[in-house]
Amino acid sequence: MTEPSHSALVRTAKDEAWKRIKSLVLDSLTSRHSKRAYGQALDAFERWCAETGGAQRAPQREPRFTKATVQAYRAALESTGLAASSINVRLSAIRKLAAEAADNGWLAPEVAAAIARVKGAKRPGVRAGNWLTLDQAERLLDLPDRATNQGRRDRALLALLMGCGLRRQELAGLRIEDIQQRDGRWCIVDLAGKGNRVRTVPLPGWAQSAIDGWLAAAGFTSGLVLGAVNKGDRITGQGMSAQSIYEVVQAYGKELGAAALAPHDVRRTFAKLAHKGRAPLEQIQLSLGHASIQTTERYLGVAQDLTDAPCDHLGIRVRSDQFAAVLSTRQSADLKRG
């Protein structure tokens, strides 16, 4: 097969060149979620090109991979009523395809550069998403029954989501060894988040207290922080799936009167309350581990402040219990050594 030249890349589902470039795109991604989304986006673009001939309608000409083709595809997506965010994910995959094709000599660099300039779909406003008020956040944290193993576990679960802004996948994989002292406070150290980006997340005192209460009841000294509790309130092992965490949050959301509450809404609540409490925006981004934080750090020269952290600005007051006045086992050991 001869190498495709200039913009002749997109043809049919049997085109070997297409398959090779698509593999390069997917191999460059680290997140399985991104791999799946980009794979689906590229498959959809390939089908559209095969069915419509892309931007080149003349029957004697093969579909071409050009800026005009991508703009026509964007228009076709917009005509279906697809959400702007979904359209923009598909366009991002196509831009990545063009870049990889150019880097490997399958597409002229100027064509790839033109495709990269295709604008994304405009959003007719900003989706606010869901989050809780300060009063709702405090009531949510107070819902678990502290007298039961399940309640202690769920209180720690909610405290980690609310106090640290963790993603549910991050919480599911959180280990006791990851919780360490830095700059005189407890933090989740070297947390590998989305895209394998590593960050350190400060813990508010009330979240550390909830963790200590759960770990004391469970008897866990290492390994995963969360654990399974059966209907008889017996702890049956360590670890919870991301789906189980979702279901726990949803159940307490219904009890609170927020039936659609999801873990990401609690994460958003962390950000909203911290910002309302005047935590510096760049510090909130550091705690959340957003994709753009590396750029923000380089551009602004931001250094993470673990003394005055975003979780200190949430304004949440948690009712004291038997664990609130007790230093954690690790902290007590540190004090003795000091």
Image (cartoon, grey):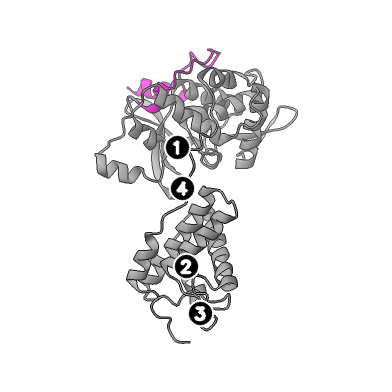
Is residue 206 shown to the viewer in this render?
yes
The percent coordinates of residue 232 (x first, y second) are 75, 28
Q: Secondary structure at mark 2?
A: helix
**Other residues around mark 4 within 10 Å, as few (<14) / some (14–19) / many (≥20):** few
The amino acid type found where label 4 is placed reads Lys
Question: Which of the numbered marks, if any, corresponds to residue 62?
Answer: 3
319 magenta-colored: yes
**Left or right, 66 with reference to 282:** right
Q: Which residue is at the front of the view, 96 or 283?
A: 96
Question: Which of the numbered marks, if any, corresponds to residue 227?
Answer: none
- Which residue has dot 2 on it? 69
Q: CA distance from mark 1 to mark 3?
A: 55 Å
Which quarter of the rendering shows the C terminus? top left
- Mark 4 or mark 3: which comes first in sequence? 3
Q: Which residues are magenta?
A: 309-338
The amino acid type found where label 2 is placed reads Thr
Question: Which of the numbered marks, if any, corresponds to residue 122?
Answer: 4
Judge whether 299 appears above or below 202 on screen.
below
The amino acid type found where label 3 is placed reads Glu
Residue at 61%, 36% (x, y): give it: 245
Q: Secondary structure at mark 1?
A: helix
Residue at 51%, 58% (x, y): give it: 75
Disc 1 vs disc 4: which is toward the camera? 4
- Which residue has dot 1 on it? 178
Judge whether 278 appears above or below 289 on screen.
above
Residues at marks 2 and 1 touching, judged by CB atoms closer than 8 Å: no
The percent coordinates of residue 87 (x first, y second) are 52, 53
182 magenta-colored: no
- Mark 1 or mark 4: which comes first in sequence? 4
Q: CA distance from mark 2 to mark 4?
A: 19 Å
Q: Which residue is at the front of the view, 229 or 329?
A: 229
Q: CA distance from mark 1 to mark 4?
A: 41 Å
